[in-house]
Amino acid sequence: MKIATYNVNGVNGRLPVLLRWLKETSPDVVCLQELKAPEERFPLGAIVKAGYQAIWHGQKSWNGVAILSRHAMKETRRGLPGDPEDLHSRYIEAVVKGITIGCLYLPNGNPYPGPKFEYKLKWMKRFTTHAKKLWNKKVPVILAGDFNVIPAERDVYKPERWVNDALFRVESRAAFSKLMAQGWTDALRTRHPDEIIYTFWDYFRNAYARNAGLRIDHFLLSPGILKRLKKAEVDMHVRGWEKTSDHAPVWIEIRDR
DNA sequence: ATGCCTAGTGATACTAGA
């Protein structure tokens, strides 16, 4: 089974690219982030035509997450728990074939310092609490999405330029480490321990052509899924397509149980 | 230190992204 995560950066603006990629790679499940569309503007017709059912949590202008699946899917949560005043659409969760799949779009947090950065750290704390609850259930779990955290120096083309960026601030990395300390495995890194891997290249300065990227889209696996892990890869070529997102799709393949 | 680019909103320059 192939499971992917893709920050599309506008699900309607990128619909041709999304459909082209779905047709090309036929993932079983896809976590989408940055829909940038309200609930009623989700392109369900085209998604269904491509062979998927979908659940989504939209929002006007910004954010928005969705899960697409070729198999039966049961929604288990929409919205990150822990703060009733937080109305951002940044988390949706479902069970597919016995696997709990959490799809997240973690706040960017820039500029640092400031209220957006504080919001990011609070969100990470709430997410870590929720992840712990899932971990304690001892069920197979995949946490996939745009984490907006560069875990280590080798995950950014020029780390010295990013020290005061919310994606690479020590506080952000420490919060990510705290989450990982629960026992999750970073799928891409565990399959490619010594490689430079990026999942994002900004639109400025010809970043993709220069491979000036960041690794910020992650797959965190529970032990039961790790045992079944066959592959973890980035569809880097998709970033080179016309009218493409600034993120590339990331995917894992796991053995059937 | 900043813009470089791109999408969304709504009809203008703006916010937001990372």
Image (cartoon, coloured by chain):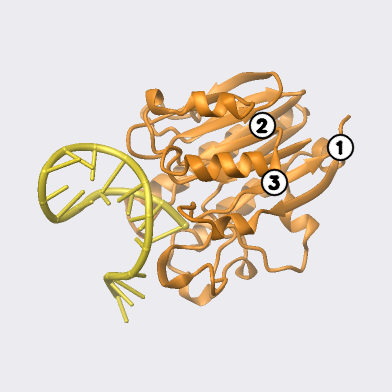
Chain colours: A orange, B yellow
Image x and y of residue A171, in percent: 50, 58
Residue at 74% x, 45% y: name it: A252
Left or right side of A257 for A59? left
Q: Quadrant of residue A154?
A: bottom right
Residue at 56% x, 39% y: name it: A19
Question: In the drawing, what numbered circle is on residue A101?
Answer: 2
Quarter that holds the N terminus of chain A: top right
Q: Nearer the viewer, residue A26 or A80?
A: A26
Gap in angstroms between the C-alphas marked 3 and 1: 14 Å
Question: In the drawing, what numbered circle is on residue A251?
Answer: 3
Q: Amino acid at mark 2?
A: Ile
Left or right side of A53 for A195? right
Question: Disc 2 or disc 3, which is closer to the eye?
Answer: 3
SS at circle 3: strand
Q: Are marks 2 and 1 on the same chain?
A: yes
Q: Which residue is mark 1?
A: A255
Gap in angstroms between the C-alphas marked 2 and 3: 13 Å
Q: Amino acid at mark 3?
A: Trp
Above or below A125: residue A109: below
Q: Are marks 3 and 1 on the same chain?
A: yes
